[in-house]
Amino acid sequence: MIFETHAHYDDEAFDEDRESLLNSLYEAGIEYVVNVGASIDTTKKTLELTEQFPFVYGAVGVHPSETAELDEEKFKWLKEAALLKKVVAIGEIGLDYYWDTPERQIQKEWFNRQMELALEVKLPAIIHSRDAAADTYDMIKAAGLKETGGVIHCFSYGKEMAKNYLDMGFYLGIGGVVTFKNAKKLKEVVEYAPIEQLILETDCPYLAPEPNRGKRNSSLNLIYVAKEIAALKSIPYEEVISITEQNAKTMYGIK
């Protein structure tokens, strides 16, 4: 069965058919979904989804672009949410220099605080890093996040940076971008990285793979990601599904 490690089913793009779509996933071969918080509001919605659907687990955290909303009171709530039974990760957290808002110092402060939280509650971290390769890696290393591990979500850097994270025991999150014709760098990373450190993700409703590029993404598209990984690594599709599922269960501590 397929393990969807990173979705945003709280997004308004799913308002019309959220329940029916989620209820259709198991028949389509998708056993688990981790819905990922990106703000206080979406983290609250994520927790609601974990209560509504037995196969949905949650990650609690604030995306770098939303960190300006954080204060001590909200962070205290986040710490309490991290202790809930179906919460399996802290995320998505990190640095985003592409949008570059809020200012980098605010992003860094709350990235550090949320990494500290991951270490405190002993949960893996879901790392968002865009156009911030060196700073993200340096901060993860300095924080000692190797202890909890986690995933570099929507991995977008080259083989050298991939090696740094793989050596620390992190997983690389591979989604729809790997199917794009111009994703040469990511295809090289997938060829290079051990399958035991890759996990499947969509980041839905964003980043739909070929042949559905540009449309609303959902976990149903993970078959295209798995097929591309299978082709790149010259291994059977079923092996990709089986190993990445076990990787995700190990990382998230789901038995």
Image (spheres, rainbow, N blue to C red):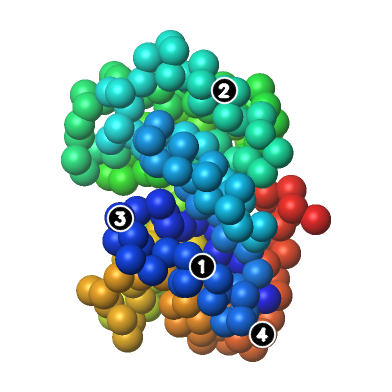
**Where residue 208 sits: x, y (%)?**
34, 72
Mark in front: 2 vs 1:
1
In the rendered structure, which amino acid carries the disc numbered 2?
A: Lys
Residue that label 3 marks: 12
**Where residue 65 sits: x, y (%)?**
28, 35
Element carrying mark 4: helix
Residue under the point 26% across and 75% down: 215
Residue that label 4 marks: 238
Would residue 149 be visible to someone looking at this image?
Answer: no
Residue that label 1 marks: 22
* 3 or 2: tag closer to the N-terminus: 3
Based on the displayed image, in which of its 4 quarters is residue 187 positioned?
bottom left
In the rendered structure, which amino acid carries the disc numbered 4?
A: Glu
CB under 8 Å between callouts 4 and 3? no
Q: CA distance from mark 4 to mark 3?
A: 33 Å
Establish if 117 lies above or below 10.
Answer: above
Q: CA distance from mark 3 to mark 2?
A: 26 Å
